[in-house]
Image: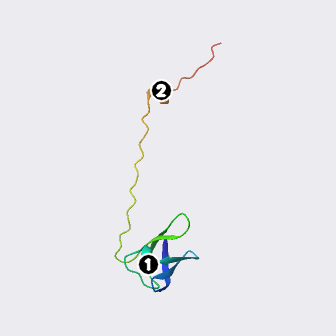
């Protein structure tokens, strides 16, 4: 998510993002931050700021998972049409 630092003072602050406000402590910040700075951040499953990627921080890249193609066998693609003889 993207957000903007607001009210950062004495190791605590707030992140504004999409109309929501999230409180944070300096312990969850990677890199440098300052008030009015826009940055990327992540929330945990409870909606609490997990990490803030400030200046100089490297955001971990998400590895793409390759999907294996299903190999078709003769039994899956061959169709037999049954007709009724008169």
Q: Residue, x 48% and y 82% (percent of image)? A: 12
Earlier residue among tags 1 and 2? 1
Above or below: residue 46 compared with residue 31: above
Q: Secondary structure at mark 2?
A: helix
- In the picture, the disc for residue 75 is 2
> Do the CB atoms of the residues marked 1 and 2 lie less than 8 Å apart?
no
Front residue of 82 and 38? 38
Local packing at callout 2 (Cα closer than 10 Å; few below 14, some 14-19, many 20+) is: few
Q: Secondary structure at mark 1?
A: helix
Give me the C-alpha separation between circle 1 and circle 2: 60 Å
- In the picture, the disc for residue 39 is none
Above or below: residue 16 compared with residue 83: below
Q: Position of residue 20 (x, y in %)?
A: 58, 75
Q: Position of residue 36 (x, y in %)?
A: 47, 85
Q: Position of residue 5 (x, y in %)?
A: 48, 81
- Quadrant placement of the C terminus: top right
Residue 64, located in which quarter of the rendered image? Answer: bottom left
70 sits to left or right of 47:
left
The number of numbered discs placed on residues in the rendered structure image is 2
Front residue of 18 and 74? 18
Local packing at callout 1 (Cα closer than 10 Å; few below 14, some 14-19, many 20+) is: some
Front residue of 81 and 55? 55
Select label 1 or label 2 by which is in front: 1
- In the picture, the disc for residue 26 is 1
Q: Residue, x 49% and y 79% (percent of image)? A: 4
Q: Position of residue 21 (x, y in %)?
A: 56, 77
The type of colouring in the image is rainbow
Q: Residue, x 38% and y 62% (percent of image)? A: 61
Q: Residue furthest right?
A: 86
Q: Residue, x 53% and y 70% (percent of image)? A: 48
């Amino acid at each position: 998510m993207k957000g903007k630092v607001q009210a950062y003072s004495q190791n605590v602050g707030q992140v504004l993002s999409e109309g929501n406000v999230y409180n944070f402590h300096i312990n969850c910040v990677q890199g440098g931050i300052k008030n009015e700075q826009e940055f990327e951040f992540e929330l945990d499953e409870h909606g609490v700021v997990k990490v803030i990627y400030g200046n100089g921080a490297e955001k971990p890249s998400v590895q793409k998972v390759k999907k294996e193609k299903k190999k078709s066998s003769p039994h899956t693609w061959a169709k037999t049409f049954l007709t009724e003889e008169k």
